Image: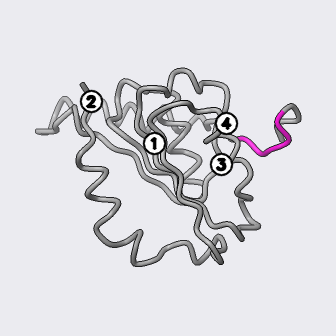
Amino acid sequence: MDTSRNVLYSTPRACLNSVLALIDTLKLNLNIDTKRIYVIGFSMGGSTVINSLSARPELFAAGISISGIPQFDKIQELATTPIWLIHGIDDTENPINSDEQFYREMSENIRFWKLKATTHDNVFTTQILGETLPKWLFKQRKK
């Protein structure tokens, strides 16, 4: 709990370094467009999206966090990375107020979908699984 903001916050786990090292190895060994590396996650994975972007903002072209809990201590480092937050208003497992605060503190490059009548477990809709997210995501490129 971040008592100054009165919201939950996430911190990266040690295994995140292993995942980032794996991405670096894959970049060296596979034909990967390094200007189009994305991170997407749901719930704890949504929290890890923000943790990943905070740890290595130069690595990722964009991130989509669905029903996660954000990390607040590196907001300035994230200013140039496009981020899309998606959260159900009725989510009681990961309350939406953390994402709302994160959205308020981010000044640029952030979108926020608040899904009405949506809990933690029913956040996936045809809108999310359809064309909207891929269209936006695949337009993002590192400069």
**Tag 1: amino acid:** Ile
Confirm or deny contact between disc 2 and disc 1 (CB under 8 A): no
Give the mark nearer the N terminus: 3 vs 4.
Answer: 4
Q: Main secondary structure of the magenta part?
A: loop
Give the mark nearer the N terminus: 1 vs 3.
Answer: 1
The residue lying at 55 percent from left, 30 percent from top is 107
Separation (CA) of disc 4 from disc 2:
25 Å
**Tag 4: amino acid:** Thr
Report x, y in % for residue 5: 82, 36
Report x, y in % for residue 117: 65, 78
Disc on res. 83: 1
Residue 52, placed above or below residue 115: above
Disc on res. 99: 3
Separation (CA) of disc 3 from disc 2:
24 Å
SS assignment at label 4: loop
Q: Which quadrant would the N terminus be assigned to in this image?
A: top right
Residue toward you, 119 or 116 = 116
The residue lying at 24 percent from left, 49 percent from top is 138
Q: Which residue is mark 4?
A: 11
Within 10 Å of the Cα at label 2, are there few (<14), some (14-19), or many (20+) other Cα atoms? Answer: some
Give the mark nearer the N terminus: 1 vs 4.
Answer: 4
Q: Is residue 130 left or right of residue 102?
A: left
Separation (CA) of disc 3 from disc 4:
14 Å
Residue 98, placed above or below residue 31: below
Task: Give, as a single range, the part of the protein colored magenta.
Answer: 5-9
Q: Is residue 40 left or right of residue 87?
A: left
Q: Which residue is mark 2?
A: 142
Separation (CA) of disc 2 from disc 1:
13 Å
